[in-house]
Image (spheres, rainbow, N blue to C red):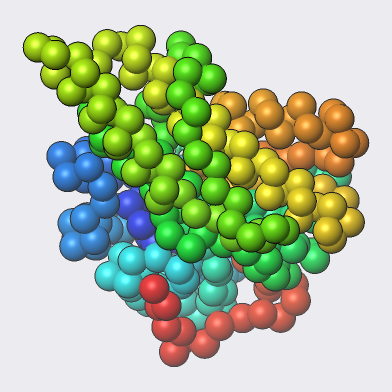
Amino acid sequence: MIILGIETSCDETSAAVVKDGKEILSSIILSQDVLHRQFGGVVPEIACRAHLETIIGIVNNAIADAKLQLAEIDAVAVVNTPGLIGALLIGVTTAKTLCMALGVPLIAIDHLHAHIYANNLENETIQYPAIGLVVSGGHTTIFLSESETKHIPLGGTIDDAAGEAFDKVSKILGLGYPGGPVIDRIAAQGDRRAVAFPRSYLEKDSLDFSFSGLKTAVLYHYRGQDSKASGSKTSSEHEIANIAASFQEAVVDVLIDKTLLASKMSNARGILLGGGVAANSRLRQRLKDKSNETGIPVYYPSPVLCTDNAAMVAGLAYKKYLEGDVAGLDLEAIP
Ligand code: KG4
Ligand code: ZN
């Protein structure tokens, strides 16, 4: 079964063709980073207009790259939640129109569940129940994943998402947008123990997250450091690297501790990482080490499948289709 997936929930316009939930025949991802960079974050109106201008070309490219004709598509899958409402609407309307014109089923996909499914695209051995940790620009959510399609939220962020914290700290340090990749790179040169930033665990055994206090601590530390460096307003590269490394370690500590706690509480048989922050090299390394210690397998997708992409959408859609979970043309976008 050949499924065309469409993803427009935030600032990537993406279309992909996936066969039988596994084989990626094509995957086109157009990042809007250059459009949002000057604002230090995603501007919803700009994202929405850019999706509108590019979606038809992206879909055509995905079909062409898969060496197919539109008429050979068996179903169309689209992310309808969560995301920016204007951005979601472009994808949902495109998908519905294609389904109507081609006479094929429409499959509605939850963006966060698709991030977890990215692991299934590359692995045959995943066992359930598993703990799914989605860490992205908009979400930090721990799921109990009972199967590829069934995910029960156990906890989430009460303020900033993990990726949002990376992006905001990057802005504070003057490192640009998106912040995650650049902090990841610069942190490798820094000392993780240079600054003792706070780790927020909330109540005992809580699976919720809070990153806004950490972000503020970075801001105060950086400002304090600036004012101490009398005469020079900029911190040295070395100091910036230390702050980046210490911040990243604080985020990773909390993500790992809570993920392992969730895994223990639910006797999980695996841990599935997903979302843009799952591309973080320190988080991957630390979780791999934990996996070796605990014997619980940890999975994370290739970096290109961590950030937003439509291959994970088309992949998950196959499993949902097999379960008879097909949407009507009255499908709504839910922000
Ligand atoms: O999943 P995603 O592409 O979009 C959303 O669904 O939000 O995630 C984007 C987020 C951004 O905040 C970006 O800074 C972060 O993922 N990110 C990273 C890394 N690569 C991307 N964060 C930490 N380390 C990375 N290597
Ligand atoms: Zn995402």
Q: Position of residue 90 (x, y in %)?
A: 31, 68
Q: Outermost residue toward the left?
A: 231
Question: Residue 29: in sight, yes or no?
Answer: no
Question: Residue 80: in sight, yes or no?
Answer: yes
Query: Left or right: where does residue 211 sit relative to residue 264?
Result: left
Q: Position of residue 191 (x, y in %)?
A: 50, 14
Q: Foreground residue, 60 or 279?
A: 279
Image quarter for ligand 1: top left
Q: Quadrant of residue 47?
A: bottom left
Q: Foreground residue, 134 or 314?
A: 134
Residue 316, relative to residue 230: is it above or below? below
Q: Count the marks.
A: 0
Report the residue at 24% width, 61% height from top: 44
Residue 302, relative to residue 268: is it above or below? above
Report the residue at 89% width, 56% height from top: 267
Report the residue at 53% width, 20% height from top: 192
Q: Position of residue 298 (x, y in %)?
A: 77, 39
Q: Quadrant of the N terminus?
A: bottom right
Q: Foreground residue, 218 or 264?
A: 218
Q: Quadrant of the C terminus?
A: bottom left
Residue 113, relative to residue 34: is it above or below? below
Residue 316, relative to residue 178: is it above or below? below
Q: Position of residue 290 (x, y in %)?
A: 78, 32
Report the residue at 36% width, 35% height from top: 218
Q: Quadrant of residue 105?
A: bottom right
